[in-house]
Image (spheres, helix red, strand yellow):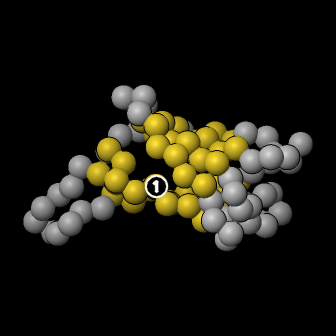
Amino acid sequence: MRHLVLSTAFLITAGALLAQGDRGTITGTVTDPSGRVIPNVDLVATNAGTGIQSTTVTGDAGAYTMPLLMIGSYTLEARASGFKTFERR
């Protein structure tokens, strides 16, 4: 079975320099080990502290964005047909 690779950027966003937000965004691209992008990958981000899950699906370029996540630690799981499930904490 083939493997998925997640290239992930964890961004903490703030509305202005003086005001800090309590939300963040996870963005990235899903590729296979050869570097080819994988579209239509189901992604689930689970907040380790609350168990709250957020979901999205990669686009045609393998890219995804999960905005407005509560600040915290997350487990990100990627699932696609024909690939092993990938998990990153």
Residue nearest the observer in this picture, 71 or 44: 44
- The amino acid marked with disc number 1 is Met
Percent x, y of residue 85? 73, 39
Give the residue at x 63% y 65%: 59
* Image position of 19 (left or right of 28): left
Q: Is residue 21 above or below residue 17?
A: above
Q: Secondary structure at mark 1?
A: strand
Give the residue at x 12% y 61%: 19
Residue lying farthest right? Answer: 1
Give the residue at x 70% y 44%: 79
Q: Quadrant of residue 15?
A: bottom left
Q: Callout 1 environment at 10 Å: few (<14), some (14 to 19), or many (20+)?
A: some
* Residue under numbered circle 1: 66
Residue nearest the observer in this picture, 70 or 81: 81
Q: Quadrant of residue 72?
A: top left
Percent x, y of residue 4? 75, 51
Q: Is residue 78 above or below residue 8?
A: above
Percent x, y of residue 89? 54, 39
